[in-house]
Amino acid sequence: MRVRIPGTTHIPTPAWMEKKKKMKEQEEEEQEEQEQVGQEKEEQEEENKKKNDNKKNKKNKNKNNKEQ
């Protein structure tokens, strides 16, 4: 049964409603993928930062040992 939705100028058909649902689901999936990519990038940056810090600490320790 078609019912006019208040605030719209057309009467939605079942096919249109299905299409709209699919579009919303697709947008949600894309947003989730983007969030996952963003989280992966942040994790990689944190790992790289830790590696760099470890390298710097090792260099500083070697310098200190040589000076003593």
Image (spheres, rainbow, N blue to C red):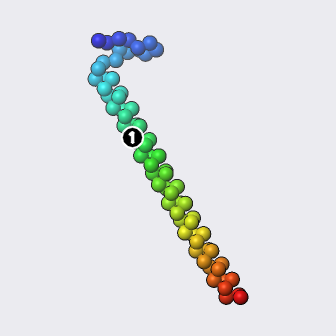
Give residue 26's position: percent from left, percent from top: 36, 37
Q: Secondary structure at mark 1?
A: helix
Q: Residue at x 53, y 60 (%)?
A: 45
How many numbered tags mark residues here?
1
Q: Position of residue 64 (x, y in %)?
A: 69, 83
Residue at the spot of label 1: 29
Q: Amino acid at mark 1?
A: Glu
Q: Is residue 38 above or below residue 45?
A: above
Residue 2's place in the image compared with 62, above or below, is above
At x 62%, y 74%, the residue is 56
> Where, by quadrant of the figure, is residue 13 drawn?
top left
| In the displayed structure image, the side of residue 65 where residue 6 appears, left or right | left
Q: Is residue 17 above or below residue 37?
A: above
Q: Is residue 57 above or below residue 27?
A: below
* Left or right: residue 68 compared with residue 23: right
Classify 10 Å Cα crowding around label 1: few (below 14), some (14-19), many (20 and above). Answer: few
Q: Name the residue located 52 percent from the left edge and 55 percent from the top edge.
A: 42
Quarter occupied by residue 60: bottom right
Locate residue 1, reporting x and y percent.
Answer: 29, 12
The C terminus sits in image quarter: bottom right
61 vs 3, left or right, is right
Q: Nearer the viewer, residue 10 or 46?
A: 46
Picture coordinates of residue 53, whole percent (x, y): 60, 69
What residue is at 39 percent from the left and 32 percent from the top? 24
